[in-house]
Image: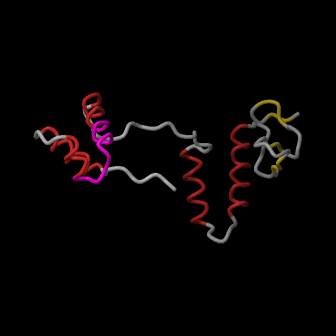
Amino acid sequence: MGRRPGLSIDDRNIAMGLLEGGVRVPDVARRFGCHKRTIYRLQSRFRHTGSVKDLPRSRRPRKRTPREERYLVTSSLRERLMPATKLARRQACNRIKDICIHCKKSTKCRQVSCSTSLRCKSPPSTLEFGTSV
């Protein structure tokens, strides 16, 4: 059994208006069909923060940057019939090209293990920015 959704922002603002107007907490809770503890917490949050909105929650960090997200979206829109796995593989190759100096457009990338580390098939052919051995 999941958790019921809480009060909407509009309901919270109305509840705070009622509380500031002198209505008792149990009456406000009864009107919105929630427990009076919910209204007490709302009142306490409003006193501390000055707002009825929820505080920001910590979330799992993103694996892709906004730039990579845009690339995936535009690539999938450009080539609608390409499978997602192929798009992801292409993005991984592009990521390696950004990181490695020795990667060229002609080299293919392969996954070495189950981890996220990827390496090029060809050994490094350049020492510094474009100078060959």
- Our reading of the magenta stretch's main secondary structure is helix
Residue 112 forms part of the magenta stretch: no
Q: Is residue 89 left or right of residue 122?
A: left
> Where does the image place residue 27, in percent across and percent down from the top left?
19, 47
Task: Tell me the quadrant of the picture where the C terminus can be found.
Answer: top right
Viewer-proximal residue, 70 or 115?
A: 115
Viewer-proximal residue, 32 or 92?
A: 32
Q: Is residue 61 left or right of residue 85?
A: left
Identify which residue is drawn at 42% across, 54% down.
Answer: 4
Is 23 located above or below residue 87 in the figure?
above
- The residue segment tinted magenta is 31-42
Number of marks in the rendered image: 0
Is 9 located above or below residue 132 in the figure?
below
- For the view shown, which residue lies furthest in the top direction? 48
Viewer-proximal residue, 48 or 71?
A: 48
Q: Is residue 53 left or right of residue 2?
A: left
Residue 40 forms part of the magenta stretch: yes
Q: Is residue 29 left or right of residue 73?
A: left
Viewer-proximal residue, 113 or 35?
A: 35
> Where does the image place residue 106, in percent across and percent down from the top left?
80, 52
> Where does the image place residue 24, in percent across and percent down from the top left?
17, 41
Is 14 located above or below residue 20 in the figure?
below
> Where does the image place residue 58, in percent across and percent down from the top left?
50, 36
Identify which residue is drawn at 36% across, 40% down.
Answer: 54
Q: Quadrant of residue 63?
A: top right
